[in-house]
Image (tube, grey):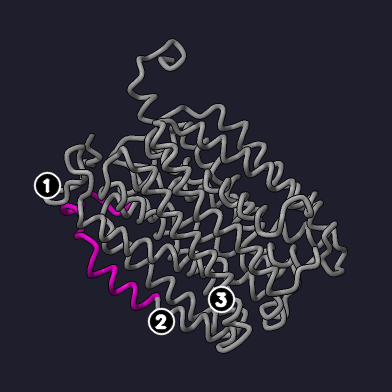
Amino acid sequence: MSVQTGATTPSQAPATAEKSIYWPFAIAWLFALVFYFIQYALRSAPGVMVPELMQAFSLTTLGLSSLLGLYYYTYAAFAIVAGASLDRYGAKAPMATGVFALAAGCVLFGLGSIGAAESGRLLQGAGSAFSFTGAVYLAARGFSHRWLATAVGFTQFAGMLGGFAGQVVVGPLVHGPIGWQAFWIDSGVVCAILAVLVLITTPGSHDQARGSVWSMFAPYKIVLTNPQSYLCGIIGGLLFMPTTVGIMIWGVPLLRSLGADPAEAVHRASSVTFGWAIGAPLLGYVADRIGLRKPALLGGIILMLLSIFSLLYMPGLLPHYVGGLVFGIGSGAAMIPYTMIKEVNPDNVKGSATGAMNFLVFSLSAVVAPAFGLELSHLSSGQPLTAAVFQRADLIWVAGIVLAFILTLFLRETGVAARSAPPTAATAR
């Protein structure tokens, strides 16, 4: 089955059923995985330097949550730009531009002033928006359709390994040899080097683009007039928030409130991202193997719900690290809607479909991140955060997971098995 879009040239034709891997795009996808790994590490890194950032910028809990949440505003907005530019120009220039923006954002964040930190966080989000969208775009052209969910799962595997490294590796660094400002500046240098490598290895752009620059947003008319696109985006957003906001920003303070020492809190929080690194490719493989998306998605949601209850309200039920690992594995289901949104829309809008998905997912995070910080401030009345405060505030994650389960029931099955089955009265409507 071809995954070719109308914009590719014959020399760039993606994988077919006879050719399961198209190597130029597959190699570029590997560099996109490195990009995604690094940006996820940088996204989660502030969670291990909360006291340092609050002191350096003279911020309250709400202020820090708002500062770090700026990332999601530009990530959501530039997800639209990323998807449209990929469909119009190919991956080469957009991906390299995204990595350069991330590099500049890191350096600004490390300068130590609140104005530079705000600008840096905005640039980090804008640049990072090209990472996952670009990786999925390249995977769709480097691998056959039958293994797309697995490739998307391994893409998220790279990201969550980055999230894991952003806590386990960065914690000892910023509390030891280099300090938090040097970490951000050094990260900017690494990203600049990666940008050059991405520019060199990514296949060239499409045929000469026609029409105005604004015409590159035309594919969104197809994606955003499809109700299934909104279902995919909202479900993905609801499943992402407990990790991107709940764990990556507030997981370490939560575990400290439960009595864990700083080093143990970092390692236990990172078990969630490590679990996601396992769950994303595993559940993607299951969805591809059985040819159905919804059973794997629903199974992951149920696993999330059961484990979050044990973590928050029965913390002694499971051994340390096990609950977080299981929750992370279940959270890997959040990547399945990324595959489904590409399958419910035409092949020639793949980049825009992923861009719309990221916009919907991270718009939810952009709204909820400061709102969650405000709720923590309200419940704590300005006092140190306690386990009881987190247990009450974290009900928002429980409600979101339950809502995701309900909405999944209304998704149209897009797996190979469903498409090859004879139409029924239900599917024909």
CA distance for labels 1 and 3: 44 Å
- Which amino acid type corresponds to the residue marked 2 in the rendered image? Val
Q: Give how far across and how far down residue 10 sits, in percent.
A: 11, 47
Q: Please rate how many residues cluster around mark 3, counting C-alpha atoms within 10 Å: few if below 14, some from 14 to 19, many from 20.
A: many
CA distance for labels 1 and 2: 37 Å
Q: Please give left or right for residue 105 compared with residue 324 in the image.
A: left
Residue 108 visible? The answer is yes
Q: Residue furthest bottom?
A: 177
> From which residue to which does the magenta span run?
191-214
Say above or below: 72 vs 15.
below
Say above or below: 102 vs 80.
below
Which residue matches tag 2? Answer: 189
The image quarter containing residue 157 is: bottom left
Q: What secondary structure is found at the residue carrying circle 1?
A: helix
- Say which label, 2 or 3, has the lower sequence index: 3
Q: Give how far across and how far down residue 135 sits, in percent.
A: 35, 55
Image quadrant holding the C terminus, namely top left
Which residue matches tag 3? Answer: 170
Which residue matches tag 1? Answer: 10
